[in-house]
Amino acid sequence: MLKFSLKTRLFFLLMALWLFSSIMPLVAQTDPDPNRFLKEIDSFRQWDAKNAIPERPVLFIGSSSIRKWKTHNSFPDLPVVNRGFGGAHISDMLYFIQDIALKYKTPSCIVFYCGDNDIAGGKSPQRVLSDYQKFVRVVHAKFPGVPFIYIPIKPSLNRWTLWGQMKKANELIRAYSDKNKLLFYADTATPMIDNDGTPHKDLFVADGLHLNAKGYELWTGVLKEKIEQARNTK
């Protein structure tokens, strides 16, 4: 039987740890199966087949924070179309981009919220940025002049331990948006933080993750000005 010195065993241990740390981020960033949303996407298809879509809609797309938002009530004077589906990663939105974005007549603007589940699922801030950039590029290939409004990943009670990563993703996307006149950043995150540096507890439902009426009222207040600004972009 081969015998190794303590120094050699320590070397192999460090190498194993290095390999593990190198592989795990790749595993953690694997995209979940988008087909888990087929039922929700099919409901969008059925609705669209039976109803007229407004000209130049304000298109709200993203994960459950969009799906749960009563956007027609919050923006009664706008031609709103809501295509949020709960639990989505940006990779899911890319997979179904035809059904949630490209099929509609040129939107007057797109309001985008996603990335929350990406970070919770182990994806890096850089991955959130790159997927968002890809989504923007695909939409702009068909609708070159459509403005985007990015709603930053929210600071929530339920996922507060991940806020450092989420904040980094927001910062990366804000810097990216600042370089393009068609990209807007609606800072809904800052007013959600209390004076003690933690999220306002009264903005959430019981799960500590999703917004209540007061939380959506805050978001609506920030978005109204940004939507008007985006829709008037030349």
Image (cartoon, rainbow, N blue to C red):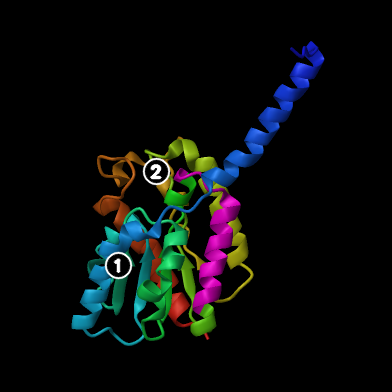
Mark 1: amino acid? Ile
Local secondary structure at mark 1: helix
State the CA–CA distance, disc 1 to disc 2: 27 Å
Task: Look at mark 2 in the image and give the residue it sits on.
Answer: 156
**Mark 1 vs mark 2: which is more N-terminal?**
1
Q: Position of residue 91 (x, y in %)?
A: 47, 60
Q: Position of residue 54 (x, y in %)?
A: 28, 85
22 up-or-down from 68: above or below: above
Along the line of sight, the residue nearer the viewer: 169 or 213: 169
The mark found on residue 41 in the picture is 1
- Point out the frontmost of discs 1 and 2: 1
Which region of the structure is painted magenta?
120-139
In this picture, residue 22 sits left or right of residue 77: right
Q: Dividing the image into 4 quarters, which one contains the N terminus? A: top right
Tag 2: Cα neighbours inside 10 Å, few (<14), some, or many (≥20)?
Answer: many
State yes or no: residue 112 in magenta: no
- Residue at the farthest front position: 1
